[in-house]
Image: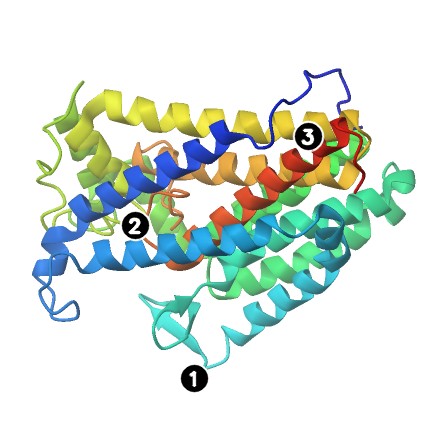
Amino acid sequence: MLYTARAPKPTGELDFALAWLILALLGFGLVMVYSASIAIAEGSRMTGHQGHFFLLRQGIFILIALAAAVVTFQVPTRTWQQAAPYLFVAGIALLVVVLIPGLGKEVNGSRRWISLGFANLQPSELMKFFAVLYAADYTTRKAAVMHDFKKGFLPMAAVMLITGALLLHEPDFGAFVVITSIAVGILFIGGLNWKVFAALIAVLLAGFVTLILTSPYRLQRILGFLDPWADPYGKGYQLSHSLIAFGRGEWFGLGLGGSVEKLFYLPEAHTDFLLAVIAEELGFVGVAVVLAMFVLLVGKAFLIGRHAARLERNFAALTAMGIGIWFGVQAGINIGVNMGLLPTKGLTLPFLSFGGSGIVANCVAVAVLLRIDWEHRQMMRGKTF
């Protein structure tokens, strides 16, 4: 059941603290992407040996994402609720399209992108946002039967199984974990029977173990994660260099631009392993600041959800908390992977890592958060939505 304890009334027209937090994350990410990618860009023919290649592209992605966020903020929450099922179906369609040879683009053995000519679209990033909306809408509509396993849980489980099958076929195990966490978290907050929830967690854990044991690719990642030093030039190569970066950074780091691991040692330094470069250049303090910003972001999302629950706006409450779950789980997994606490998943760090689809999806989600909060403030002034 939604948490409806009394929360303080919001003041002002907009939560500028949240807006500035996101701008700080985007700005910091832009600087670190440039620092982590300059050597790779200068040494690659694909970038024309231009050191600023990824900096310019990330800057363009951020501008597009901010423009999309401004447009998104104009959309009322009720419109998102009405559109949620259609957006989810569109997301499923995109996940199918990406698997079609000739339409989906394959990189390093994974088919996760659709080429748009000037950029690549990654449907799984959009699907995270669509999953939040759909799960929130479903749970709101099924509130009266959420305690019923057959009527409340099974339909949602069937839909998520289809989504999971498509994601695993790419394969994109990381996105599958995040989307599953979003759906399960929203169902639980929305009133899913705790016995069903416990059984679901047990089944999911068993399913994850089965997926790992039946896939040599995933099993290799697990073995490399458990002891990266056993094969530092093979399956443990990426993690071992990430750990070296953390060790070199110590308390205050080597200084911005001072990373050695980004010089063709650490693969994906500007995407999946950006935090390792942050750790090497800015040390424990830099990593602690990143952690603090994500804790604040997730806390803000849940606080906005509490306001919505107090006003009996269940869809808005579940959407806000679902966004918080999304950012918290994805950031937590990425940080855990970089620190050697979790096996590699191919997940980026929200708002910070290089990538267009992820940045746009993240900023659109925050715009929805800001819209929900803005509507609360207007309701306090006697307006209705």
Residue 291 image point, x, y percent: 38, 26
* Residue at screen point 39% across, 38% down: 23
Q: Which mark is residue 102?
A: 1
Q: Which mark is first along the chain, 1 or 2? A: 1
Looking at this rendering, what residue extends furthest in the bottom direction?
102
| Mark 1 residue crowding within 10 angstroms, few (<14) / some (14–19) / many (20+) | few
User: What secondary structure is marked by label 1?
Assistant: loop
Q: Which residue is mark 2?
A: 271
* Residue at screen point 46% across, 80% down: 103
Q: Is residue 350 left or right of residue 188?
A: left
| Residue 211 appears in the rendering | no
| Residue 80 appears in the rendering | yes
Q: Which residue is mark 3?
A: 377
Q: Nearer the viewer, residue 24 or 122?
A: 24
Q: Nearer the viewer, residue 22 or 222?
A: 22
What is the distance, in whole Å, between disc 2 and disc 1 at their CAs?
Answer: 25 Å
State which mark lies toward you, 3 or 1: 3
What is the distance, in whole Å, between disc 3 and disc 1 at their CAs?
Answer: 48 Å
Q: Nearer the viewer, residue 86 or 205?
A: 86
Residue 284 image point, x, y percent: 24, 21
| Mark 2 residue crowding within 10 angstroms, few (<14) / some (14–19) / many (20+) | some
